[in-house]
Amino acid sequence: MRKVLVLASLLVLFCAVVVAQDAPKVEVFGGYSYGLLDDGDGYHFNVNGWDASVTGYLHKKLGVTGDFGGLYGSPHDSTVHLYTFLFGPTVAFPSDKVTVFLHALLGGTHVTEESTAFAMAYGGGVDVNVNKKFALRVGQFDYLYTHIGGESEHHFRYAGGIVLKF
């Protein structure tokens, strides 16, 4: 696990060195989120909710992201509320029409009637630029890992919505 985290961090930093165009100082995203959750026993179920993030760019295309989300569903005749709070590096590859980004986020999760536990998300997405200050996030796709109650769970998360650039 440690090797994967080190490799992902090095990849993100390497990508930041390669990119040479200007980027906004801050991006704020908010929108819809869909999740395909694993209950740890191999049962998968669909959930819906929201995702919001703030990315502050430190140098060229390398930024630091805070990502917060909530997913809600009713598997097995019960109610699940899964909240995530994740932080980590983001690398953006902008052009006039489209911005592609990658991120590696670590933090925590809180699930209904469980304590707060470890979570991480690796993925990226595509923003379609409407102008220099506004974009539509057509897709953010993440592998979301949680370790809740001693169980390792592997999830998929999609988000889409509006991006404001400052």
Image (spheres, rainbow, N blue to C red):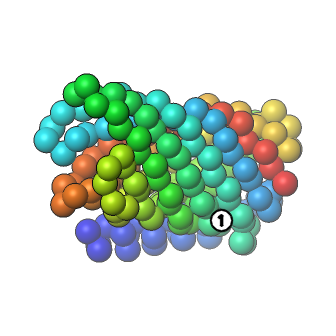
Which residue is painted at 85% across and 37% down in the image? 131
Type of residue at label 1?
A: Gly
Residue 141 seen anywhere in this rendered image of the structure: no
Q: How many marks?
A: 1
- Judge left or right: residue 162 versus residue 67: right
Question: Which residue position holds label 1?
Answer: 63
Residue nearer the viewer, 36 or 2: 36
Location of residue 128 in the rendering, given as x and y in whole percent from the top left corner: 70, 34
SS label for mark 1 = strand
> Label 1: few (<14), some or many (≥20) within 10 Å?
many
Which residue is painted at 28% across and 31% down in the image? 78
Q: From the image, which quarter does the N terminus lie in?
A: bottom left
Location of residue 147 in the rendering, given as x and y in whole percent from the top left corner: 27, 58
Which residue is painted at 73% across and 50% down in the image? 28
- Judge left or right: residue 78 versus residue 132: left
Give the quadrant of residue 82: top left
Residue nearer the viewer, 126 or 16: 126
Give the quadrant of residue 134: top right
Q: Which residue lies furthest to the front in this view?
A: 113
- Judge left or right: residue 154 versus residue 10: left
Residue nearer the viewer, 163 or 126: 163
Location of residue 107 in the rendering, given as x and y in whole percent from the top left corner: 45, 64
Residue 71 seen anywhere in this rendered image of the structure: yes
- Residue 16 in the image: above or below residue 101: below
- Judge left or right: residue 62 versus residue 21: left
Location of residue 74 in the rendering, given as x and y in whole percent from the top left corner: 33, 28
